[in-house]
Image: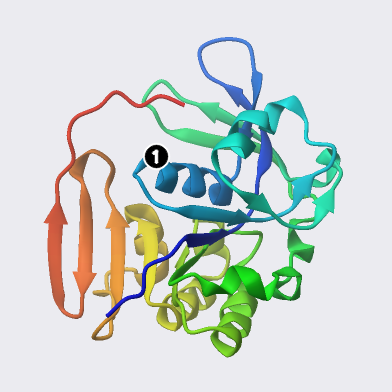
Amino acid sequence: MIKRGPILIIGGASVDKVRADGEPRSTPGGAGLFTALAARQAGANVRFFGFRPDPLPELFAKPASLVPWQGPACEVEDLPHFEIVYEQDGNARLAAANWGREETLDPSMIDDSLLDSPLIHIAAIHAPELQMHFVKSLRSRCDARLSAGTYGYMARRAPDTVRALMESVDLFFMNEFEQTLVFGDERPTVRPGQILIVTRGGRGSDIWQGDHCTRVPICPATPVD
């Protein structure tokens, strides 16, 4: 039986400059923060852990009002800053990146009071080696089910580490492009009891459980930022 309780999302918030059919504009971003907001929108009880700028700028006022956000204080300049260009076909291109202090995020910064969650998700942060550091620490400190995700640069730079990260957690998320970078033409190896989710854009998602794969379709939608 899986105990009930809030989901803990570990990751980052970022300041994004988005270019899409017009002048660039600043917007809150970060895989960790957006995962927490998406989980809340889906009806989950969720908490978010990551660097939190103090004082909190207006840019992050709305996200912070929606999701309980805990973590070490920092200057807003210490957060990652990304410039993202959305192409006409809906694909996004990372034009510039400054990772700030995200590489210094450490599991020792997490208070034990946050570790009563039944599920802890480690979002894509700086490097897969840092995610692995969180996995090893959390395994020794709590009995939560652990989840993690990746992104294209990680999968290209360190496919073996991303594969090891996937093997170390209970649930793992990646997209079709990242799957190709990590596994090539191989079928993913998913152990019994583990779940791998591979998103495929407009073609839905593949849910891998052991050797069994289920295709989950999506409803057609127009992508927006």
Question: Measured from the top left, where is residue 196 in percent x and y?
Answer: 30, 68
Taking the image as shown, residue 54 lies to the left or right of residue 207, namely right
Query: Closest to the observer: 106 or 183?
Result: 106
- The relative height of residue 171 versus residue 219 in the rendered view (above or below) is below
Comparing 182 with 76, the one in front is 76
Label 1 neighbour load within 10 Å: few <14, some 14-19, many 20+? few
Along the viewing direction, whichever of 22 and 147 lies nearer the viewer: 147
Tag count? 1
- Answer left or right for 85 relative to 178: right
- Quarter-wise, where is residue 179 in the image? bottom left
Please report the residue visible at 41 percent of the width from the left and 20 percent of the height from the top: 88
Q: Is residue 70 above or below residue 167?
A: above
| Disc 1: which residue | 41
Residue in the picture at 61% in, 68% down: 114
Q: Is residue 76 left or right of residue 212?
A: right
Q: Looking at the rendering, which quadrant does residue 158 occupy?
A: bottom right
Q: Position of residue 93 (x, y in %)?
A: 53, 35
Residue 204: give x, y in percent of width and height.
21, 46
Quadrant the N terminus occupies: bottom left
Look at label 1 and name its amino acid. Gln
The furthest residue to the bottom: 140
Q: For the view shown, which residue lies furthest in the top direction?
A: 22
Question: Looking at the image, which residue is at 40% across and 24% down?
Answer: 224
Q: Residue at x 43, y 75 (%)?
A: 166
Q: In the rendering, at what x and y percent does residue 2 appear?
A: 32, 76
Looking at the image, what colour scheme do you see?
rainbow
User: The residue tagged with tag 1: helix, strand or loop?
Assistant: helix
